Amino acid sequence: MTTRRQNRECAVQLLFQLDMNPAEPDKAFPAFWAERRADPEARQFTEDLVRGVLQNLPQVDEMLTRCTEHWQIGRMGTVERSVLRLALYEMLFRRDIPAVVSINEAVDIAKYFSSSESGRFVNGILDRARKEIGRPVRE
């Protein structure tokens, strides 16, 4: 059994992969899962997150652009961009996930896959986005 944190880590890895090597998600998923063990519920949650980000990418990237000063999306590290896109998708479209959860998970995942500096960068952008979206920290 996997945790939601592990599912989000998988989602970030898939988003990273699809950002670096664009492909149809339905073709990328089987190859990704062939190397990992996950129960059907975990796979479903992960794939729903990835599909949600990709289906709403224009709105997610618009919010990301508004919340970053002096940073073009294309100049961001791919890890940070993937983490931010996932968290912003959750904050914009997944009301079942409290904003504080999305932010905390994103900061920890950014630190895990990149550096503590990435964690601070991600935290600052997501806090600004949360305020702009107008979501309470906890619902």
Image: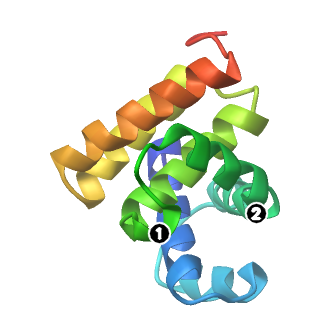
Neighbour class for label 2 at 10 Å: few (<14), some, many (≥20)? Answer: some
Residue 113 is situated, as x and y percent measured from the top left of the image, at: 28, 60
Note whether 111 is above or below 28 in the view shown: above
**Regarding mark 1 in the picture, which secondary structure is present there?**
helix
The C terminus, quarter of image: top right
Residue 1 appearing in the image: no
Note whether 97 is above or below 115 in the view shown: above
Q: Is residue 43 left or right of residue 123?
A: right
Relative to the observer, which residue lies in front, 47 or 118?
Answer: 118
Residue 95's quadrant in the figure? Answer: top right
Relative to the observer, which residue lies in front, 129 or 55?
Answer: 129
Q: How many marks?
A: 2
Relative to the observer, which residue lies in front, 15 or 75?
Answer: 75
Toward the front, the furthest residue is 70
Mark closer to the chain start, 1 or 2: 1
Q: Could you tell me how far apart the alpha carbons at marks 1 and 2 are, in whole angstroms? A: 13 Å
Kind of residue at badge 2 = Arg
Residue 32 is situated, as x and y percent measured from the top left of the image, at: 55, 81
Residue shown at 53% from the left, 43% from the top: 4
Q: Which mark is residue 13?
A: 1
Residue 57 is situated, as x and y percent measured from the top left of the image, at: 73, 60
Note whether 14 is above or below 52 in the view shown: below
Q: Is residue 93 left or right of residue 66?
A: right
Residue shown at 45% from the left, 52% from the top: 6
Residue 112 is situated, as x and y percent measured from the top left of the image, at: 25, 53
What scheme was used to colour the molecule?
A: rainbow
Give the labeled residue for mark 2.
Answer: 51
Kind of residue at badge 1 = Gln
**Regarding mark 2 in the picture, which secondary structure is present there?**
helix
Note whether 74 is above or below 93 in the view shown: below
